Image: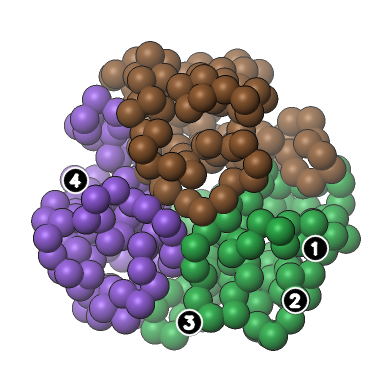
Chain colours: A brown, B purple, C green
Amino acid sequence: MPEIDRSEPYADLMHLAVAHGDTVHLAGIVADDLGADMEGQTRDVLGQLDEFAKAQGLDRTRVLSATIYVTDMADKPAMNRAWQAFFDPAHLPARATIGVADLGPGVRLELVALLGR
Amino acid sequence: MPEIDRSEPYADLMHLAVAHGDTVHLAGIVADDLGADMEGQTRDVLGQLDEFAKAQGLDRTRVLSATIYVTDMADKPAMNRAWQAFFDPAHLPARATIGVADLGPGVRLELVALLGR
Amino acid sequence: MPEIDRSEPYADLMHLAVAHGDTVHLAGIVADDLGADMEGQTRDVLGQLDEFAKAQGLDRTRVLSATIYVTDMADKPAMNRAWQAFFDPAHLPARATIGVADLGPGVRLELVALLGR
């Protein structure tokens, strides 16, 4: 069986990044600065994604899929601005944006993503 | 590292299908005809799933898992009718149906799915 | 192509566990006793996860990622108590907890998870 490599634990509840076989699983990625607006929170979350990728010897062209949970779909254009500034248009992941009821206080988006290694 | 094969980009924001290793990731699949009722939108979404599978040399027996986001759980029986008409009962994916707040105007369901190749 | 191994079908709509390559996909896992409170429902769901893992010759240290949909984020502390009692802190999955509108009558959480084999 392939080994499982886990990043630092977070709040004794999860690991933010778990690598196994040819994929790296990221979940529960929210902005560090929850006072930021949607564009800022998205930039923050994608910056963290970038760090997790680099820690695996990967980069942002290796994102396979992303599910983005948002609390207000009206924020989508602001999210998309940060998204398009971040990704190379030839290397975009599969993506779903889902409008949900609650992500915790101040959280405007939460990212679940998969990287290929 | 295994290569990543991406389908056509969609709205400069995502690829609808991204293949890597032995899996194909689909996300953000919504009906083309958003005027249709739930049974029609489900048929439409599953028809697109079928096309993505065929484009990979696969078929509907190779769906590993599906998360279906719906805006009204009362629509579930209508969704299930289209679902059962589509899948062979011996080759059903793992499935979660999640009732969410908002998927965009007119969107009754959105599909995230994984195919095995 | 790797073979796909499916657990028993559920309600003619899905398989609860689908194995392919080096991963096992679980989706739609809800408590058997929907009269239980959040801590009880979480224990129930994690008990089922454990059974699915064992059926594959795996255990709870092989959970790669988990997305938990909950209908009331105020239930999160109760969920976390059952979660931390279940998992070894050195072998936690990547995790997202998403507050959604509706999971069906009485359902307080629904689990989608991935095991590595």
Same chain letter for marks 4 and 3:
no
| Other residues around mark 1 within 10 Å, as few (<14) / some (14–19) / many (≥20) | some
Q: What residue type is labelled 2?
A: Asp
- Secondary structure under badge 3? strand
Residue at image mark 2: C37
The answer to which of C93 and C115 lies nearer the viewer is C93
* Subunit under mark 3: C
- Secondary structure under badge 2? loop
Residue at image mark 3: C10
* Earlier sequence position, callout 2 versus callout 3: 3
Same chain letter for marks 1 and 4:
no
The answer to which of B41 and C10 lies nearer the viewer is B41
* Subunit under mark 4: B
Depth check, mark 4 against mark 3: the one in front is: 3
Residue at image mark 1: C78
Determine whether label 1 and label 2 are within 8 Å by CB: yes
Asked if residue B60 shows in the view, the reply is yes
Q: Distance between the residues labelled 1 and 2?
A: 9 Å
